Amino acid sequence: DGGITQSPKYLFRKEGQNVTLSCEQNLNHDAMYWYRQDPGQGLRLIYYSQIVNDFQKGDIAEGYSVSREKKESFPLTVTSAQKNPTAFYLCASSPRQPNTEAFFGQGTRLTVV
Amino acid sequence: DQQVKQNSPSLSVQEGRISILNCDYTNSMFDYFLWYKKYPAEGPTFLISISSIKDKNEDGRFTVFLNKSAKHLSLHIVPSQPGDSAVYFCAAIPRAGGTSYGKLTFGQGTILTVHP
């Protein structure tokens, strides 16, 4: 059963700590993405990767880091440098071809306490 | 710099009537447009899309219209059902090639409520 798995669904972090959000896909997609959703602001792109071992900053990359060592995995680290990390984080993947939709995971709610 | 805009934060419609959700964009490099539906605490699910070479695409109760000269698209849902109540996002992808390849840009979303 193909899809995108994000874990955990809920995550609590103390201020000053780094935390890594997991994203795994078995859709054999080349491209993967991380978005952040805040109330009233839609989905904003943090990082994206078109192929393994390559990734680009999105619109709000500051305070985040990623890696793409395997095609199936695209973990996102929220560092202590991210000033407002409490948000709903969404991972997506798509085939690397024109005019195709992206498929999303169920999201991770990160709360800084 | 909001390249994709949904200017109506919310829309309320009676069951059985038409829902019309609107979206405007500013980047003329956008080549493909999508609508996603999202429930709270879940990931968005793809609804319908349209290429810039078309002005209409239909899938069951859902129709998307594209007006390239006005840089405007709309999603029509007919007839609306209570289960359609969700947040609807429009998104756009630029033409193939370059570093923005495949990159989706989303609007802010519109909350649709369909009353029984």
Image (spheres, coloured by chain):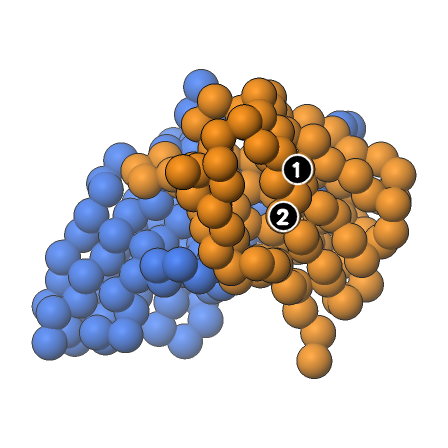
Chain colours: A orange, B blue
Q: Position of residue A86 (x, y in %)?
A: 43, 37
Determine the residue positioned at 82% across, 43% down: A68
Q: Secondary structure at mark 1?
A: strand
Is the C-beta separation of discs 1 and 2 under 8 Å? yes
Q: Nearer the viewer, residue A39 or B10?
A: A39
Give above or below for A2 relative to A106: below
> Which chain does tag 2 point to?
A
Q: Nearer the viewer, residue B56 or A89?
A: A89
Whether residue A91 sits left or right of residue B34 in the image: it is right
**Marks 1 and 2, Cα distance to the nearest angstrom?**
6 Å
Determine the residue positioned at 87% across, 51% down: A70
Which residue has dot 1 on it?
A77
Q: Which mark is residue B100?
A: none
Q: Position of residue B107 (x, y in %)?
A: 41, 39
> Which chain does tag 1 point to?
A
Whether residue A59 sits left or right of residue A20 in the image: it is left
Which residue has dot 2 on it?
A21
Q: Quadrant of residue B35?
A: bottom left
Q: Quadrant of residue A40?
A: top left
